[in-house]
Image (tube, rainbow, N blue to C red):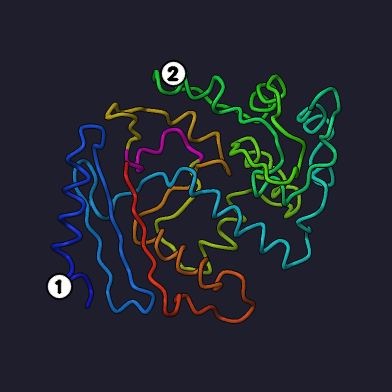
Amino acid sequence: MKGTAGQPSIDKLVSRVLSSDRITGAVLCVETGDRSFTAVSSGGNLQANDYYFVASVTKLYVTAILLNLRREKRLHLDDPIGKFLPEADIKGIHVYKGTDYSHTITVRQLMSNTSGIPDYFSFSAFRELQRGKDQPWEMGKVLETAKQLKPRFTPGQRGKAQYSDTNYRLLGSLIENAASESLRETLNRYIVHPLQLEFTYLYEDADDVRPAPLTYRAKQLHLPKYMSSIGAEGAVVSTAQETMKFLRAFMGGGLFRKKKPDYLVRDEKVWLFLIC
């Protein structure tokens, strides 16, 4: 049953979502684990096959890359980040109650948002972007901003976590150094090519107009300079069906096997709900 009997229910759900005056477009992709049912619905300013920024779901793609690098023994999750990142980047990134913990932070702590490194985005970047001020945020600017902020806990402190885009900007550089190739190349090697994705890529060209525009509270934001600069933080572009294909492979383990992967997640329901 490929989006037939259940399609009206999916369409109705999308229509309900779009009744909010703060949501300008939506894409909903639903599948069962055995793929006996799959459906895609869209509305507003989005079509089912439109390109869009997966935004922070990019971090799941980055996690898949890191786990493959670990499988290949190019890194270990408990390696200190200083093994892969320049001293100038690390020093002072985490100073808590007068002690610099920067060199104790591990790859695992960046991945799990337990490093305690402050989130640069929630400081000044978010306010500027929502006002429509488009500008690139290169690594130097990200680090400078994060180092001005105060961590809330020591790295790996039990029971503590803080979502921080700074963590994944650092992981982007770490991946490039560990793999000796660009983030775009690692994305292609570990995800795009194995899954035969045709419409998934890392957004790096500010003149690329393929992705649907971003919105915030129904206000359209034109931020190509920013989006083309953030890499591992949130710059992957895809479509609903290709994002589902990635999730299916990720959750089913297909991305992490040496043999030919089986992309199905058996006996489980998988769903993807994307709102732009």
Q: Position of residue 190 (x, y in %)?
A: 59, 63
Amino acid carrying label 2: it is Lys
Magenta: predominant secondary structure element?
loop
Q: Quick one: label 1, few (<14), some, or many (20+) residues within 10 Å?
A: few
Chain-order first, disc 1 or disc 2: 1
With respect to residue 86, does 46 lie above or below?
A: below
SS category of the residue bearing label 2: loop
- Is residue 95 inside the magenta stretch? no
Q: Residue at x 65, y 23 (%)?
A: 141
Which picture quadrant has residue 186?
A: bottom right
Assign the N terminus to one quadrant of the image: bottom left
Decide which of 120, 230 is in the foreground and name it.
120
Q: Nearer the viewer, mark 1 or mark 2?
A: 1
Q: CA distance from mark 1 to mark 2?
A: 45 Å
Q: Residue at x 79, y 33 (%)?
A: 90
Q: Position of residue 11 (x, y in %)?
A: 17, 57
Q: Residue at x 72, y 55 (%)?
A: 179
Amino acid carrying label 1: it is Ala
- Is residue 211 inside the magenta stretch? yes
Q: Which residue is mark 1?
A: 5
Decide which of 163, 233 is in the foreground and name it.
163
Q: Position of residue 108 (x, y in %)?
A: 72, 52
Q: Is residue 50 left or right of residue 188?
A: left
Which picture quadrant has residue 140?
A: top right
Q: Position of residue 104 (x, y in %)?
A: 84, 41
With respect to residue 70, does 180 lie above or below?
A: above
Residues in magenta, as a range: 204-212
Q: Which residue is mark 2?
A: 133
